[in-house]
Image (tube, helix red, strand yellow):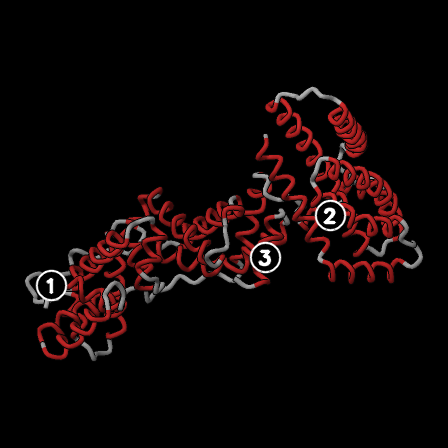
Amino acid sequence: MNPITDDDLVLYLYRDGLDAARIAQITAALAASGALRERYAAIEHAVAHFGQDEIAPEPDLGARLWQRLEPQLEEAGVFVSPPPARVGASVPGRSVVDRLRAWLAPPPLRLAFAAAAVLVVAIGTGFIVGRNSATVSPPVASTEADGSAARVLEAYVAANLRATEGVLLTGSNSRDASLLEGNRELAQSLLESNRLYALAAARAGNTRLADFLRQLEPVLLSLANQPGMAAVQSSEDLRRFLDATDLLFQVRATEARLARNGERRT
Amino acid sequence: MTDDEARWIARARAGESAAFRHLADANAAALFRVCARITGDRATAEDAVQEAFFNAFRHLGDFDGRSAFSTWLYRIAVNAALMQVRKRPHLEVAWPKRDDGDDTTLLDAADESPTPDRHAVSAEIRRDVEAELARMTPIERTAFVLRHQEGRSLEEISAALSLNVGAAKQAIFRAVRKLRATLEAPGEPA
């Protein structure tokens, strides 16, 4: 039998790093030898007092950490949706609807609409020209053009989805008539751009994205026609629908995936 | 990983700040405990936890779900605590130091029991053990804390510290030798 070292006894103490046969040998040797038992007791004694004075976390640890962490994460661009505390922050001199528009509408929404139209025309034209022409484009140039078109489309769809997320949240949570009125207008404009993006995605061969955008259409349509007078019932229905379909989560996940794709391509 | 946790992680990946907050709240206390054990200092432990969350959340896309989310966070926190200790040499004296003028050996002191001073003697032993802990290298101290206090296996310790299992064992052996040296009087049999 190999001699039993103090290091073996340390491993034996924690029953870690020794195979079963070695553990059995040491157990038998400890039973038989008083000197070995003394060595083992010295090791147990050495570690026994360690760690008895624990530094416990304070009750407000989570809140304090978050207070420091939130601005760091925000600055690093980790958040896609705004931190909850800032959503309701008031901006003096602006109406509720204006604030809602500022939060929900991506700045280049009108531009996005135009870009999507250009994209659809470009892809459609390319498709027709490609079918009728015998000329084959150089593969590298074609790949670059495809990548660039996909990047543009994804960037605009991500912005549109962010606005859609806001419209869904407002539609399902708000009981304020003026907020819902602004929300209806936004839903209408998002509905139009959403149709164009779905078409562009389908033409570009991104059927997964196209299908997802088509799924959003009936929801945006009902939000665009959400009755102001029956806001409470309507909001509850929408909330139940969102819970049942997990649509909000899917919108956020798709938005994040498109943003990540964009980052990878640049 | 539970479905609920997976859902919070997915929401955090989508950039939802409330999901980050939820994940931070759910794991803060456990991470603080291990960081406090490694650093021995409350403020430094908090800094380590903050750094760990920041790094973890920035690289949430790297979490592949093969281990539990808490295990993944735990490894990041251990390394953040280790970095804090390395960055701040003054932490080497943050633990109470032994009074070198006291020639009473700790085993002698422990053997005086039972006496009315037993609790005071125990506290003195603990202080000296912790002082010895401060003399360990950061790797020795962390490996020992993870094995002895956190109950982590050698495999887990080696993964957390990016060591091979043999090196993790050796770090623990050295730590135990240093603790024994504190408790045993010169020339006294072990």
Q: Tell which subunit mark 2 falls on.
A: A
Residue type of the residue flagged with mark 3: His
Q: Tell which subunit mark 3 falls on.
A: B
Q: Residue A34 in the image: state x and y as whole percent.
A: 9, 77
Q: Residue at x 24, y 75 (%)?
A: B118
Above or below, A253 against B172 in this view is above
Asked where in the image residue A3 lies, by quadrant, the reply is bottom left
Q: Residue at x 83, y 43 (%)?
A: A191
Q: Nearer the viewer, residue A89 or A36?
A: A36
Residue A28 located left or right of residue A145: left
Q: Specify whether disc 3 shares its chain with disc 2.
A: no
Label 3 to label 2, Cα distance in Å?
28 Å
Label 1 to label 2, Cα distance in Å?
74 Å
Instruction: Please name the residue that numbered disc 1 is placed on.
Output: B185
Mark 3: secondary structure: helix
Instruction: Please name the residue that numbered disc 2 is placed on.
Output: A212
Mark 2: secondary structure: helix
What is the number of the mark on residue B82?
Answer: none
Q: Nearer the viewer, residue B114 or A99?
A: A99
What is the number of the mark on residue B22?
Answer: 3
Image quarter where the N terminus of chain A lies is bottom left
Residue type of the residue flagged with mark 2: Phe
Q: Look at discs 3 and 2 and give the one toward the viewer.
A: 2
Residue A132 located left or right of residue B99: right
Q: Residue at x 68, y 50 (%)?
A: A84
Above or below, A247 against A137 in this view is below
Q: Residue B74 in the image: state x and y as whole percent.
A: 43, 55
Q: Look at discs 1 and 2 and give the one toward the viewer.
A: 2
> Is residue B132 at all visible to an observer of this figure?
no
Asked where in the image residue B89 lies, by quadrant, the reply is top left
